[in-house]
Amino acid sequence: MSKTMDIDKKARYFGTDQPLYEAEIHMLKAVKENEGIHVTGLADMLGVTKGAVSQTLMKLQRKGMIVKETDPANLSRLTLKLTQKGKTAYLSHEELHRKYEKVFSDILADYPEANKAFLRSFFSMLEEKLDKFME
């Protein structure tokens, strides 16, 4: 788990000329998968403050990853969408996740189903306990 966290802490070039940190690429992912979302909706969805969202969005905007547009339904609100560079980073990030999944599936391929069931149960319980721990 520590090695995975170390990997996530490092900025990466997701197919673009700009390095992105974990929070930035995951915010790009959220915008891409909820195109037209606004700052408040994004903050609610990610469970962070509007201020944190705004700061990260400013960084992403400076890096040329997102654009803010006036919401035609509410002229006082801005909606978010990815630029072409942002879409490239999103697709590169999705490919990285596919590679991670392949690493895990390759490791587990030769194990019996009982071992896989144990791991699923273990990680499910671990996630539940960690969620309670963080409350």
Image (cartoon, helix red, strand yellow):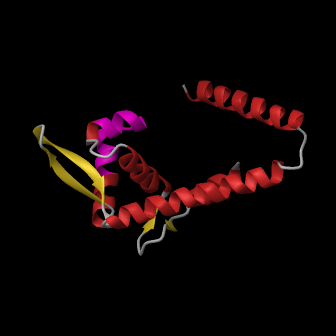
Q: Is residue 28 left or right of residue 6?
A: left
- Asked if the magenta segment contains residue 42, the reply would be yes
Magenta region, main secondary structure: helix
Could you say which quadrant of the image residue 102 lies in?
Answer: bottom right
Give the image location of residue 3, x and y in percent: 70, 56
Q: How many numbered marks have been drawn onto this rendered protein structure?
A: 0
- Asked if the magenta segment contains residue 125, the reply would be no
Give the image location of residue 105, x and y in percent: 76, 50
Q: Look at the image and tell me in which quarter the C terminus lies.
A: top right
Q: Is residue 121 left or right of residue 20?
A: right
Residue 49 in sight in this render: no
Q: Residue at x 29, y 43 (%)?
A: 51
Q: Is residue 129 above or below residue 1?
A: above
Q: Residue at x 40, y 50 (%)?
A: 27
Q: Which residues are magenta?
A: 41-55
Q: Residue at x 82, y 37 (%)?
A: 116
Residue that lies at the very extreme toward the left in this rendered image: 75
Q: Residue at x 30, y 36 (%)?
A: 41
Give the image location of residue 91, x and y in percent: 48, 60
Give the image location of residue 58, x and y in percent: 28, 57
Q: Is residue 42 above or below residue 10?
A: above
Residue 81 in sight in this render: yes
